[in-house]
Image (cartoon, coloured by chain):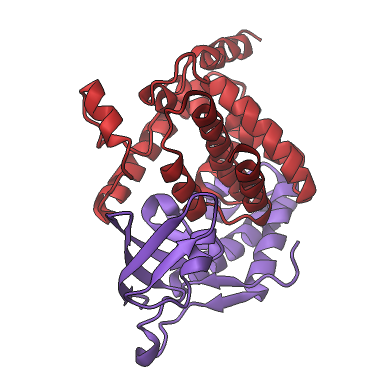
Amino acid sequence: MEEEKRYYLTKEGLEKIKKEYEDLKQIKLAKTKGDVPRVLQSEDLNAEYLAFQEDMGFLDSRITELEHILKNTEIIKNPHKDKQNAIGLGATVLVDVNGQSDEFTIIGTLEANPVLGKISNESPVGRALLGHKIGEEVAVSSPVKTVYKIKKIKYRIG
Amino acid sequence: MKNILNFLVETGKLKGKARRGWMLHGIKNSETTAEHIFYLAILSWLIGKQKRLNIERVLKLALVHDLCEVYAPDITPYDPLLPKDKKKIAEALKKWPKFTNALRIKKDKMKNHSEDKAISKLVSKLPGNLRSEIKSVWLDFCKGISKEARFVRQADKAVNFLQGIEYWKKYGKIQHKLWNRWIKEIIDDPALIDLIKAIEKKFY
């Protein structure tokens, strides 16, 4: 476990983690007593919990991981208005890459999902873009040079 | 035992299922889904060990992650934007596929639905404990719940990048510049970022 790691989460992401943690603790408690966990009978059951109900060792390791995340979380907030012209966590960025436009949001690793346009701040592209402003060109270093021209920056976090 | 044998025979079909992405790129005798699973399992084991992950979990995740393709279609990042005309496909592959957010969400939902149906069908006749284990490992992979699953999800992309670069060096038919851009947007695991750097150093 990486002790120093910070987890950047949206408010919604943090709520999801907290709910999972509480539900998994309930599953563990009920299974220790030999009961059928109430959370497994509820209608709003997250299908993911099925992944843990049969495997106590795995359930324990997920609970430990969630505790670690909750202890090291930082909520992503919109920056002050005069800093919203620079790319920070939570920014949705419109870029031009080799003549093609693309739009994505820079988010923490736990909520990143590139398929849905959510890029991790720890990815090479996420790292390279952070701090840059509209009109700037950012080259991502590699044998192949890819240049991201920043067209727009928006903050949509609630 | 009969149901386990039937499951094996069905999953064995992946040994002969060429991966669609490579076929679209015109790669002859390309990697099959089973070969991709093998490559991913080895990579995940070696790097997962360095990361001190639960290797039993890591290997199960790698083995299970594409089993749904016995019945579900092998969807590429370009679907459903690919034209039917083969010549136009080559042209389309030269550019990065562009989706609206709404289409991204729709595509993801459809893929999940089709794969969920496929994996449920595949394991349906297995004994209960095996059925629930395979289904739960698969669900963990799809949702990226455990740290092992989040790692194997990214390792899946890294091994695809490696295979793509190997094909580029051998046949030159892969848009390696696009692949380079893609991999740097989707991988954030430090060990896998190091692997990508090592791949670039070896092949460029």
Quadrant in the picture for residue B109: top left
Above or below, comparing residue B123 to residue A71 in the picture: above
- The quarter in which the N terminus of chain B is drawn is top right
Above or below, comparing residue B13 to residue A70 in the picture: above
| Residue drawn at x 22%, y 28% as measured from the top left | B88
Of B148 and B135, the residue lying toward us: B148
Quadrant in the picture for residue B135: top right
Quadrant in the picture for residue B20: top left
| Residue drawn at x 61%, y 64% as measured from the top left | A21
Colour displayed for chain A in the image of the structure: purple
In percent of width and height, residue B119 lies at 48, 28
In percent of width and height, residue A108 lies at 52, 67
| Residue drawn at x 53%, y 38% as measured from the top left | B161
| Residue drawn at x 67%, y 75% as measured from the top left | A71
Q: Is residue A151 found left or right of B138 in the rendered image?
A: left
In percent of width and height, residue A49 lies at 56, 50
In percent of width and height, residue A11 lies at 46, 75
Of A38 and B44, the residue lying toward us: B44
Colour displayed for chain B in the image of the structure: red
Above or below, comparing residue A126 to residue B100 in the picture: below
